[in-house]
Image: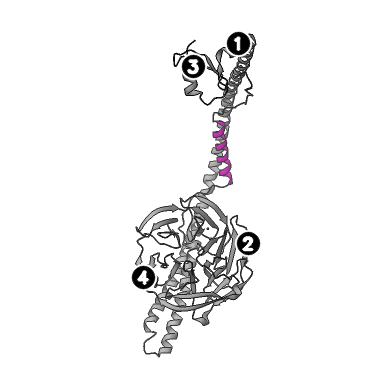
Amino acid sequence: MECDKHKQPLHLYCPNHLMPSCDVCISTSHSKCPGITSLASVVEKTKIEKSKVTVEKDINHFLSILDQLVTSKSKNIKTGENHCIGVKKSINEIRKEINKHLDHLEEKLCQETDIIWNQERSKATDFISEIEGKRQNLKEVKEHLQTVTTNTSKLQSFLGVHKIEQQVHQCQRYIEDLEDDERTKEVDIKMKRNGEMENILSKLVSLESLGEVIVDKTEINLNKETSLRRKAQAKSQEQSNINNMTMNIETKIKINIGKYKRDMICLIDGRVIVVEWEGKVNLLNSDCKLQKQLPIPGEAWGVTQINEDTIAITYPRERAIKIFNMENETVTKVFQIEKRCYSLSFSNNSLTVGLRKEEIRIIDLEGNTLKSIQVQSESNLYNLVYYDRRVIYSDSSGKAVYCVDESGKQIWQYKHDLTVPRGLCIDTYGNIFVADCDAHRIIVISKDGQDSKVLISKEDGLENPKFICFKHNESSGFICDSIGRYLAKFNLSCE
């Protein structure tokens, strides 16, 4: 006998592949197979009649399996035909019930529509009246500002301007709170599905499932035994005990980039980014002089640094996070978020973002959600930082700072004598530095949330601090006031 492939005599046998072979087959396809022997010796030792019986047994075994498959498939066909008849009958009956429910809903919803719209129209009219009152007050303050320094002493002028600043500050607080005020949302009258409608739709979905062709797969035993983390921005001193910490203001630097601010960070190279209330993103050099406004469209809010050339910024109104390359001055990625997004922190090659009042979300640099942490904050999540598998966030309206783990479990809360906690940053030991705005002070809270200390207060020249950030790998940094008049450069020491 010859090899069909190489036309050479079959005089060898491979026991691993149970295959008669020629010399070429052995050298090309079975060179690594052990136990190559002569075909003649294998034939001599083999009992042909016994092999014949074994092969016949295998054939009968496989025939029984194929018979079982034919029987099963035939049964499936008959069952499917019966189910089709039943489903068609059920569809007719349920459709009658659906029509009955829809007639009832139509009449009921038309009446409710008129009632609800009248209520919403009244709320909107009252809100407009409130806004007009605030506008009138601001106009009066503006007119008074033009005359407060006329024919008065310097002391009287100072007190007058200071009083107006406080009034404007109150207006700022009012406007900030409007970000979370339900009355600012556009009202759209739509039909909301109630329980009755949901029951009807549930039946329809069930009918669709019953109408699908379902193959009932019966498993057959085939016997094969045949004969075949806002980066932590501060680098603390070796001593982490907060009782030994002291902080002092080295100098105040005036900045002329608008008033109210939304966020501030120190970049790795020593420069500073400040986001204005209007959403403009300002890049300051290491001396805090305005270098440029970054050409990013939209109204920015929170900002964090990803690497030396890349930052990420939230855009609440657009419900988006934009990745921006500062060297090329281009937006490289946009992640759409279904909720308003505010504060940002970067750690462990992922972004942590605050969504409205109720959610902190951790996403990768492709926009995929890694964790969703549910929280209960009285104010929007304007300030947070991710560190060591924990998220620390401030609740200005609730007058508290919270620490939660990635499951949303609260590790600790700090409410001692806080007024309006705003900006946060963390040192390498996990100590939290908080800008307590209306109390005019910076507080440090220990990593476990049990201890705290006031580091700077109004007596040190601090007024309405809103943000605090450390320079990269340094124990100094900047504090920005809420109105955005200056950046205060500070130094931290642990004696």
| Residue type indicated by callout 2 | Ile
Residue at which label 1 appears:
44
Q: What whole-number distance in Å separates the C-alpha atoms at marks 4 and 1?
A: 96 Å
| Residue type indicated by callout 3 | Cys
Which region shows up in magenta? 190-216
Q: What whole-number distance in Å separates the C-alpha atoms at marks 2 and 1?
A: 79 Å
Q: Give the number of the mark in front: 2 or 1.
A: 1
Query: Residue drawn at (63%, 71%), measured in percent from left and top?
Result: 451
Which type of secondary structure does the marked residue at label 1 adopt?
Answer: helix
Residue 224 image label: none
Which badge, 4 or 2, is on the more N-terminal residue? 4
Which type of secondary structure does the marked residue at label 4 adopt?
Answer: strand
Q: Is 36 or 51 nearer to us in this picture?
A: 36
Residue 290: percent from left, percent from top:
36, 70
Q: What whole-number distance in Å separates the C-alpha atoms at marks 3 and 2?
A: 74 Å
Rendered view: 425 above or below 222: below
Residue at which label 4 appears:
290
Residue 411 image label: 2
Type of colouring: one colour
Which type of secondary structure does the marked residue at label 3 adopt?
Answer: loop
The quarter of the picture where the C terminus appears is bottom right
Residue 22 image label: 3
